[in-house]
Amino acid sequence: MKKFAYILLAAAIFSSCNWEFKKQESPETLSGKTEDARKQLDEMLETDKAFSAASEKNGMNKAFLEYAADDAVLLRPGYMPIVEADVIKYLNAQEDTSFKMTWEPHGADIAASADMGYTYGVYKVVTADTTLKGTYLNVWKRQPDGKWKFVIDSGNAGAEKTGM
């Protein structure tokens, strides 16, 4: 129940912010941000890219375990939210040697407090004979040691259509 309340709190915080989905490179995304928030946004975005590189190099499971916060939540099709210790069990049960998973952020934003933000983009899974694409959203939280860790990770298969 505590995790559900945490998810609701995060949703309420994000919905109360006047955030727009824009590409990170766009100057409008950074308008009105403090210098610290701009710096933290860049660091968070670089962390997302490093997370993808770690997945490609070391396998998805190792990368997810390295970049997940202790209170991380995974949202996966067909599952209730996977939380905390269950994240480790879930990841360790997934076979990740027959494919490479990478992703590229298409946008990001950060709270004015510069301690929480999100990235979103497109992921790619490559097997011996298939390439699959989908979209993802990561919610990031700056940890007491200054590192960024994801607190929520979600993905949706299929990324062929654009717009409505």
Image (cartoon, rainbow, N blue to C red):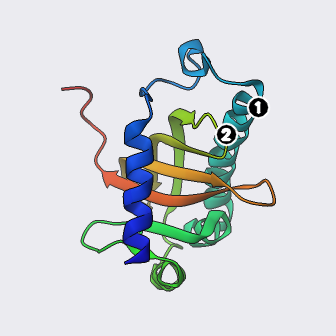
Q: Position of residue 31 (x, y in %)?
A: 60, 16
Q: In the image, what residue type sits under mark 1?
A: Asp
Residue 40 quadrant: top right
Query: Callout 2: helix, strand or loop?
Result: loop
* Nearer the observer, 76 or 85: 85
Q: CB atoms at circles 1 and 2 under 8 Å apart?
A: yes
Q: In this rendering, does residue 140 appear at all?
A: yes
Q: In the image, what residue type sits under mark 2?
A: Ala
Name the residue carrying label 2.
114
Q: In the figure, 153 relative to 94: above or below?
A: above
Q: In this rendering, does residue 136 appear at all?
A: no
Left or right of residue 50: residue 17? left
Q: Quadrant of the C terminus?
A: top left
Q: Residue furthest right?
A: 145
* Nearer the observer, 65 or 160: 65
Q: CA distance from mark 1 to mark 2?
A: 7 Å
Q: Which label is found at residue 36?
A: 1
The crowding category of the residue bearing disc 1, from other C-alpha atoms within 10 Å (few below 14, some 14 to 19, many at least 20), is few
Query: Callout 1: helix, strand or loop?
Result: helix
First reached walking from the N terminus: tag 1 or tag 2:
1
